[in-house]
Amino acid sequence: MSELMEMLIRRGFLWQSFEIYGGMAGFIDYGPLGNGLRRRLENLWREFFVINERAVEIDTPTVNVEEVFIASGHAESFTDVAIECKKCGKVFRADHYIKEKLNIEADCTIEAVKEIIEIYGLKCDCGGEFGEPFHFNLMFTTSIGPGKGKRGYLRPETAQGIFIAFKRLLDYFRGKLPFGVAQIGRAYRNEISPRQGVIRLREFNQAELEFFVHPAEKTHPQFKRYENEVVRLVDKFDNEHEITLREAVERGIIAHELLAYFIGKTKRFLIEAGVDEKRLRFRQHKDDEKAHYAADCWDAEALTSYGWIEIVGIADRTDYDLKRHMEHSGEDLRVFVQFKEPIKVKKLKIVPDLKKLGPVFRKKAKAIAEALERMDVKDANVEKVEVEVDGEKIEVSRDFFSIEEVEETIQGEKIIPHVIEPSFGLDRITYVILEHSFDKDVVDGEERKVLRLKRWMAPVQVAVLPLLSKEEFERVALEIVEMLRNAGIYTEYDDSGSIGRRYRRFDEIGTPFCVTIDHQTFEDRTVTIRDRDTTKQVRVKIDELVNVLKELLSSEKDITEFGEVFRG
């Protein structure tokens, strides 16, 4: 890991933020290469989860008003248990500190942490004793506007902006389920003591899809694409399964088809991005581990030098979020779902007596009558009901209305959609891709460091190298650079040092192909293309170079299919 991190920092993938001021844990900068790789990851994600779904992408503010997170439950539930040293004042996340020092998996409750500290006499690294454990909310607070302003938070997930805009989005989709809404952007969590470099950040990048469905129809028309995909599952009882997704659903290991569909799609996406399938599994959250909004959740986990780390969470959020925002905002976030065939039902209906309501309630009588007519009533013998008119609650006795049984034709019903959410930590996935791609081998008797990135993920796709630092070689090389860039191929030029040293430089940053201008170029207008992984080279005509490289970059075809093997 240290060897990889040294290379990533040296070559411009990422480094510590605020370096000249001593840095700050939980923040990183993406350098030119790291930013390029992450952007390619984002675009691949869009292909899978926006373009190839009934989905759209939106962008909402990273600062949200307090009411949003009171409604969502984050204001009270989005907490970790912290412990503070009385002597040095350092604060630690309790379960992580206990795991590190005692190798005990502690429940994330104040009572459990307190008991462990007392039983084991756990102390701070400085020797000081810990005070009482306490809950620490992980959201960054801020003030919106001048003076005291309005209390706000930096969002801890991108999802809430989607839920708040649900009515607008429902109109966009013409009121028809299912549909998905995606968002890629920054999220913020004020981690107590972030460690492990890019694995636990205070500011990070997420890609989330909220897929809205009918509660009784948690299926997907494209499930057949993934039903025979064999996945490695670890269920909430720690049982391991190597099983197809179809069988996992039939056996009840995965709750329903829609969760299985997104597990399959996520697996394909991660492998396409460069995660090693042999170091990938899906683990179900235990009952005491699930987020406050989740009925079920599966994490895609990758094996790294840090151990197994979560890189994707696929959660069934049920109707939790929309129901909470309905309760707190007063807005109706239900969806009208039409029945295939109208149905007739018998129901009880309140019939107001306006002759009696008028003299007693005067100007409010009409509004009260309308409110009574809208009410659902279950008991024909009810003696009084309560209605709300202009914010005032009014009790109405049976003297002012009667109850009749009527038959109605029902065309449909209003339901609160359920939400399936695949949530991707782009920073963690980026790191996993880099670690899983990092390799060393021996070429020409020398050790070589190489990033075996998927060709379509490489931040630098092609390097153009003149064999010699002479004007005629450089001129042709720069012409080729311009041609490739105009064709949309991300290309770099390098004429510094020996050709072997330049190959090694681009191998190290994962560039799939190097194009070399040599003596033969001036004889027959050909160049060599060198493959990063095999170091094989083929000769290709300059006029065919763009088409050949585009086909190579979008596939895993062997380079020898495209030209005569170069043996110079």
Image (cartoon, rainbow, N blue to C red):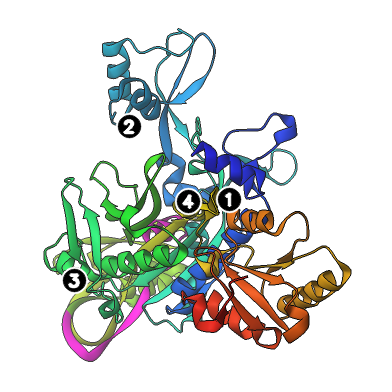
Disc 4/disc 1 C-alpha distance (Å): 47 Å
Numbered disc in front, either 3 or 2: 3
Q: Residues within 10 Å of mark 2 (few under 14, many from 20)?
A: some
Amino acid on which disc 1 is placed = Val
Disc 1 crowd, CA 10 A, few/some/many (<14, 14-19, 20+): some
Residue under label 2: 108
State the SS at label 4.
strand
Question: Residue at 76% across / 84% down in the picture?
Answer: 523
Q: Which mark is residue 246?
A: 3
Q: Which residue is mark 4?
A: 439
Q: Seen from this angle, which residue lies furthest left?
A: 251
- The span from disc 3 to disc 1 (Cα, nearest Å) is 42 Å
Distance CA(mark 4)–CA(mark 2) = 38 Å
- Nearer to the camera, 565 or 534: 565
In the image, taking residue 352 as reference, residue 138 lies left or right, namely: right
For marks 1 and 2, give the CA distance.
28 Å
Total labels: the figure holds 4
Q: Is residue 520 left or right of residue 243?
A: right
Task: Identify the mark nearer the N-term, 1 or 2.
Answer: 1
Q: Identify which amino acid the numbered label 4 is placed on.
A: Asp
Q: Dots 4 and 1: beta carbons under 8 Å?
A: no
Please say if 325 is above or below 5.
Answer: below
Q: Which residue is mark 1?
A: 65
